[in-house]
Amino acid sequence: MYAAEINRKQPALLLLLLDQSYSMSERWGDNGKSKAEMLALTVNRLLTDAVLQCSKGDDRIHDYFEVGVIGYGADVQPILHGTDSSRPVLPISEIGRNPRRVDRVKRKVSDGAGGLVEVDLSLPVWVDPVTNGPTPMAQALEAATVIVADWCARHPASFPPIVINVTDGASTDGDPSEAARAVRSARTDDGDVLLFNLHLSALASNEIAFPSTVEGLQDQYAAQLFAMSSALPSVMAEAASACGYAVRTGARGFLYNAGTSTVIEFLDIGTRAVTPTGLKELTAANSTT
Amino acid sequence: MTSAIDRLSRVTCRTVPKRDRRPDENEDSVAVDLVSGRFAVSDGASTAARSAVWSALLVDAFAGGEDPLAPDVLDGLRREWWSKVFDPGLPWFAVEKLQRGSAATFVGLRIGGGAYQVTAVGDTCLFHVSDDELVLVGPVDDHRDFSRYPDLVSTHQPLAPAAVWSGGGAYRAGDVFLIATDAVAKHVLRERVPGVLRVCETVGGDLEFVRFVASGRQSGLDNDDTTVCVVHT
């Protein structure tokens, strides 16, 4: 299980659920940006890396995976530029060719021969920060269930979809546990859908990462998110260990009271499966296979 | 014309791309110059930018008489790579990818006058078999030591001296040299000499080698661009 090769005939799916409630306008971290702004930056960076992994440096992008982003706040809807409710996920080639805009900054980079050249650095933007309304998490998970169930039916041999829910607060539309169970119950031949939950905190104190038991969680809400989260497949657990996390057997894909760096690291670990050569591929290094 | 390897009886190179890929997507490169007795194989990193261009530059430089690992030559090759691949009209993702650079493994073998020298970076390997003995194998000499992150010759990162492996010695008529990219090298190292000889038996024709690779992939040969260069002395 969780071993399917990810290739162009057998792509993978990454689906992000982003809390866009009013509380996401709170400052997060020490750079003056809000949770929503930092999260949008992180998601745009993640999508940029994903596109680059599927590029060989020419005008082609190979479709190793598909991506969708559902925002939930005043509305529950696809927010990735180019998506809508009839087409909530896009192949990575369309995402790469169709950012909402590409911001540019000047940067000096190595010319490979000991010198520096000034180049235009592209900062593509697909997701802008939005903060408005409550936290309809159950509804977002229900929307995710429809998407992943349909996707699994069309890609039975693929690595199962990875769904990452990022929130800073409790659900305002009822207990999301049943909706989470429905997300996790969708499956491909390679395993159940993976649902990971990231809870952000402006304070980033008492941070809990990859717990394997509900014991020690501070409150009922943390226990609820823990129960909603899938266990990390072994290769992701190994990746988390390699990043310095104390990961025990049965560790869940769950962060509580997480600060910015932990969230960025978690997104890297949680999306390593969604790379052209599979789970063992690290995004930061070159592989010849 | 007198060749440095007049006494070589046969030189054969074969390459097969990853399963379901077109030949033009193969990022391995091989170059041979029989006159000077130079043979080179390079495996372009699949996650890097335009690595087929980079691997070709490395092997062509070696076959042309240069040492692509020498700092001045390497700097020139890096500039040549950039000039070949960069176009200001490329889309944002291509430009960004190119700015992250390319990388490849490399083996260069020089044979002549009864002696040979090899220089290598990464996990493309040289095997020298003489009298059914594996006289030299490297840079990797145990199938358990292959990883997904071999040392690489990069367009952007400095080449660490420790990453360069070299060897050499004498050879005799009837010896066999095999240069193989990592998938075959790893496979061969499970059997050592019989593995080398089995590869040598399959390079007679393109179709024969394609069948060997396809069959191997059913029994543990990694699905990777696969290239070999066999020199019979």
Image (cartoon, coloured by chain):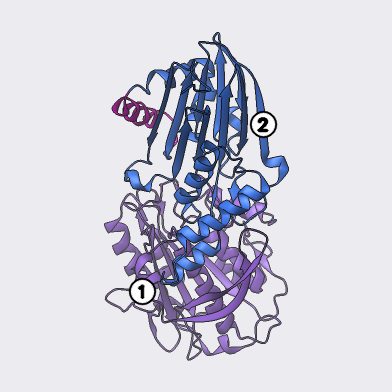
Chain colours: A purple, B blue
The residue identified by callout 2 is B166
Against A167, is A59 above or below?
above
Q: Does the magenta stretch include residue B212?
A: yes
Q: Position of residue B72 (x, y in %)?
A: 66, 50
- Structural distance between the alpha carbons of marks 1 and 2: 58 Å
- Three-letter code, disc 2: Ser
Q: Where is residue B198 in the image (x, y as percent from the top left)?
A: 43, 18
Q: Where is residue B224 in the image (x, y as percent from the top left)?
A: 43, 40
Callout 2 secondary element: strand
Q: Which residue lies furthest to the top in this view?
A: B131
Answer with left or right where residue A84 lies relative to residue B165: left
Q: Can residue A269 be seen in this view?
A: yes
B197 or B223: nearer the eye? B197
Q: Which residue lies furthest to the front in this view?
A: B1
Are there few (<14), some (14-19), or many (20+) residues within 10 Å of tag 1? many
- The chain letter for the residue carrying disc 2 is B
Dominant secondary structure of the residues highlighted in magenta in the image: helix
Are there few (<14), some (14-19), or many (20+) residues within 10 Å of tag 2? some
The residue identified by callout 1 is A143
Magenta residue span: B205-222
- Three-letter code, disc 1: Ala
Could you tell me if the residues under marks 1 and 2 are in contact, i.e. CB atoms within 8 Å?
Answer: no
Callout 1 secondary element: helix
Q: Quadrant location of residue B218?
A: top left
Answer with left or right where residue A281 lies relative to residue B224: right
| Residue at image location 51% in from the left, 67% down from the top | B96
Against B230, is B76 above or below?
below
- The chain letter for the residue carrying disc 1 is A
Answer with left or right where residue A111 lies relative to residue B46: right
A177 or A253: nearer the eye? A253
